[in-house]
Image: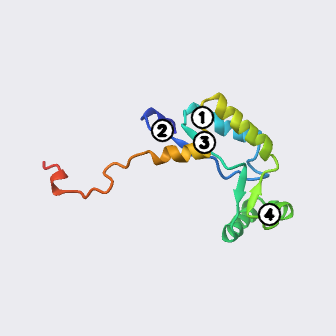
Amino acid sequence: MKKLRDAGIPTVVWLTPILPFMNDTEDNISNILDMCIEARVYGIICFGMVLTLREGKRKYFYEQLDRLFPDLKEKYIRTYGNRYMIESSYNRDLMRLFHRKCEENGIVHDNRKIFNYLHFFEEKNANRQLSIWDLEVR
């Protein structure tokens, strides 16, 4: 992100996934936000401190939990069952932190504003057929 900033390219970060019992800590979210602040990102998209699990994705996620974090899968199943939207129990406090740090540092954190902003970027050479006359002859 810093290289993009240094090149004058505005950046937007999508803050996801937030994994309950793993990375849903104030310290982790704060550190991510600090990196965004340092890189002077334009905005951060966040729909909450959540993880979404579709059926096929859930199977893969649980396989990886079994492989990397034994016993954690059972905690997810007990806590969330088969829910699609897995929200951190710290969502409210972490979202408060997210909004406060963004506001204090001039980072856009209204998802609608960010998506509108992204639609304004023009595509270079959009819908333009490359011509032989565009080639440089040496």
Whether residues under marks 2 and 3 lie with C-beta atoms below 8 angstroms apart, the answer is no
Mark 2–mark 3 distance (CA, rounded to whole Å): 12 Å
Mark 4 neighbour density, 10 Å: few (under 14) some (14–19) many (20 or more): some
Mark 1–mark 4 distance (CA, rounded to whole Å): 35 Å
Q: Which residue is mark 1?
A: 107
In-front residue for pair 98/73: 98
Whether residues under marks 1 and 3 lie with C-beta atoms below 8 angstroms apart, the answer is yes
Looking at marks 4 and 2 on the same chain, the residue that comes earlier in the sequence is marked by: 2
Residue 76: image x %, image y %? 81, 61
Mark 3 neighbour density, 10 Å: few (under 14) some (14–19) many (20 or more): many
Q: Which residue is mark 2?
A: 10
Given the current orientation, which residue lies at the most extreme top position?
104
Say which residue appears at 54% left-offset and 48% top-offset. 115
Label 4's element? helix
Q: Which mark is residue 44?
A: 3
User: Looking at the picture, which amino acid does disc 2 mark?
Assistant: Pro
Label 2's element? loop
Mark 1–mark 2 distance (CA, rounded to whole Å): 12 Å
User: Looking at the picture, which amino acid does disc 1 mark?
Assistant: Ile
Q: Nearer the viewer, mark 4 or mark 2?
A: 2
